[in-house]
Image (spheres, helix red, strand yellow):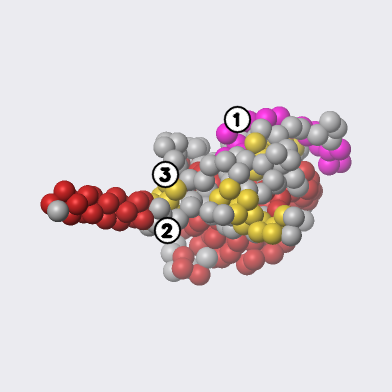
Amino acid sequence: MKNFQYFVLLFSLFFSFSAFAQSYPTCASSASDPDGDGWGWENNRSCKVATGGNSGGYPNCASAASDPDGDGWGWENNQSCRVVAGGGSSGSCGRGSCPTSLSCPSGMSCGCYLVSGLGANKQAYKNAGANRSFLASAMMETERMDTNYAYGDNKSGDAFNAGAAKQNWGMMRQCRPAWRSYGSNDYAVSAAMNSNRSLDVQVYNECRSYYGDQWFAGHRNGSSGLSNPYTQDINNFRAGYNWTYNQLSGHECDDVRFWVNIPAI
């Protein structure tokens, strides 16, 4: 009888442990598992990184383009699918490849090349809520679309830059309601964007909404640009952005980088 009770106890413990081990949610993104051990951290709890062709009972999307709002879910073959960072077989994710030919903006040179790891950065920002507009702005600023550049881009005051799109403090302290009480010398507040992708994307969206088309003028030439928003240089910058935005279609999570050389002021 004692042996039987001992067996029942072991079986109960095993069953409880198995149920507990299977209670973790599936990670929305494999980027949540930087050490590749199969476990990630999302929404303040552990999650299991999906492997193979199934994510929590849903198939993996063949293309990240099926997820235009970047929330990790797509729609293919009349059913929901999960977007897995770096996955996909359509060529829109993974390594990617440059177009065979490019038509550059008038008066500008342009090109395309691959940057190892760029796709992961694109996807990480998309997971943080970025749309193609944000990706285009970030692509125009740094090769890897990240914040690994000199603090403030070696600027201070209203010229201080922060985030992957290198927005300036003078504009951000106006467009972001929570920062409107700050002055020019409080620029260090925005440095939090360099380590918080969600905040970076949020501030970008707030500024684009607040300034409208004149965002390009202020971004390119600060307060002088806002006062005179349609100089040839600012028009060139706007054209370069529009070109980059268009080229990114189908390349929002691969290693493909487009560049355009905007004539100097």
Location of residue 98 by image quarter: top right
| Residue at mark 3 to residue at mark 1: CA–CA distance | 24 Å
> What amino acid is found at the position of numbered circle 3 in the picture?
Trp
Residue 65 shows in the view: yes
What's drawn in magenta, residue-wise? Answer: 103-120
Above or below: residue 179 compared with residue 42:
below
Above or below: residue 241 compared with residue 207:
above
Residue that label 3 marks: 39
Marks 2, 1: nearer the viewer: 2
Residue in the foreground of this view, choosing between 22 and 265: 22
Q: Where does the image place residue 139, in percent across and percent down from the top left?
A: 65, 42
Query: Which disc is residue 178 wearing?
Result: none
Number of other residues with Cα within 10 Å of mark 1, as a class: few under 14, some 14 to 19, many 20 or more: few
Number of other residues with Cα within 10 Å of mark 2, as a class: few under 14, some 14 to 19, many 20 or more: few
Q: Where does the image place residue 17, in percent across and percent down from the top left?
A: 30, 52
Going from the N terminus, do you reach mark 3 or mark 1 first? 3
Residue that label 1 marks: 116
Query: Which disc is residue 43 wearing?
Result: 2
Q: Is residue 118 magenta?
A: yes
> What amino acid is found at the position of numbered circle 2 in the picture?
Asn
| Residue at mark 2 to residue at mark 1: CA–CA distance | 28 Å
- Image-based side of 230 in relation to 200, left or right: right
Location of residue 215 by image quarter: bottom right
Secondary structure under tag 3 reads strand
Going from the N terminus, do you reach mark 2 or mark 1 first? 2
Residue in the foreground of this view, choosing between 60 and 238: 60
